[in-house]
Amino acid sequence: MKKVSKADQFIADMIRCRGMDWVRIGMQIEVSGDMGTIMGMNSSANLDVVFVNQLKMGKHSHNCHPTWETQYFDETGKVIKDYRCAVIAKELETAHG
């Protein structure tokens, strides 16, 4: 039986637990204004994130809900998904006139 890689297991778990098939280990995200890198998933199906500003946030990974005030970026730095409340409210306002 072939061993599943950590990256492949992460994708399978994100799909199963959160329905998010586009989230990847190593992906750059912004959580509540702080930039970080996804390092994995914890037992709560939340993201383990290490933040860039280690003076402010420390060197350890943080338990981050995948849709709370979070933006996801592709390899080029383009936002591919935005869960910030202000953005969602604006989208709802536009959709409902």
Image: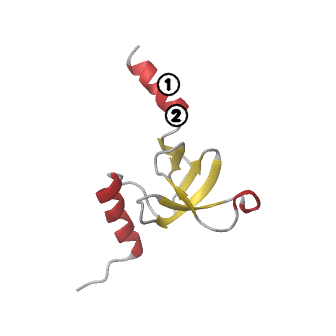
Q: Which mark is residue 59?
A: none
CA gap, disc 1 and disc 2: 9 Å
Amino acid marked by disc 1: Lys
- Give residue 10's position: percent from left, percent from top: 39, 66
| Image-based side of 9 in relation to 49, left or right | left
In the rendered image, the quadrant that contains the C terminus is top left
Task: Using the rendered view, name the quadrant where residue 49 is placed.
Answer: bottom right
Q: Which of 78 and 42 is in front in this view?
A: 42
| Image-based side of 81 in relation to 36, left or right | left
Instruction: Name the residue rendered at 38%, 54% in the picture.
Output: 22
- In this rendering, the label closer to the viewer, 1 or 2: 2
Quick check: 91 above or below 13? above
Quick one: label 1 or label 2, which is nearer the N terminus? Answer: 2
Quick check: 43 above or below 33? below
Residue lying at the far right of the rendered structure: 55
Quick check: 33 above or below 18? above
Local SS, label 2 = helix
Instruction: Name the residue rendered at 53%, 38% in the picture.
Output: 84
Instruction: Name the residue rendered at 52%, 50% in the picture.
Output: 73
Mark 2 sits on what residue? 85
Tag 1: Cα neighbours inside 10 Å, few (<14), some, or many (≥20)? few
Tag 2: Cα neighbours inside 10 Å, few (<14), some, or many (≥20)? few
Local SS, label 1 = helix
Q: Which mark is residue 90?
A: 1
Instruction: Name the residue rendered at 59%, 65% in the picture.
Output: 61
In the rendered image, the quadrant that contains the N terminus is bottom left
- Give residue 96's position: percent from left, percent from top: 38, 17
Residue lying at the far left of the rendered structure: 1
Amino acid marked by disc 2: Cys
Q: Which of 57 and 91 is in front in this view?
A: 57
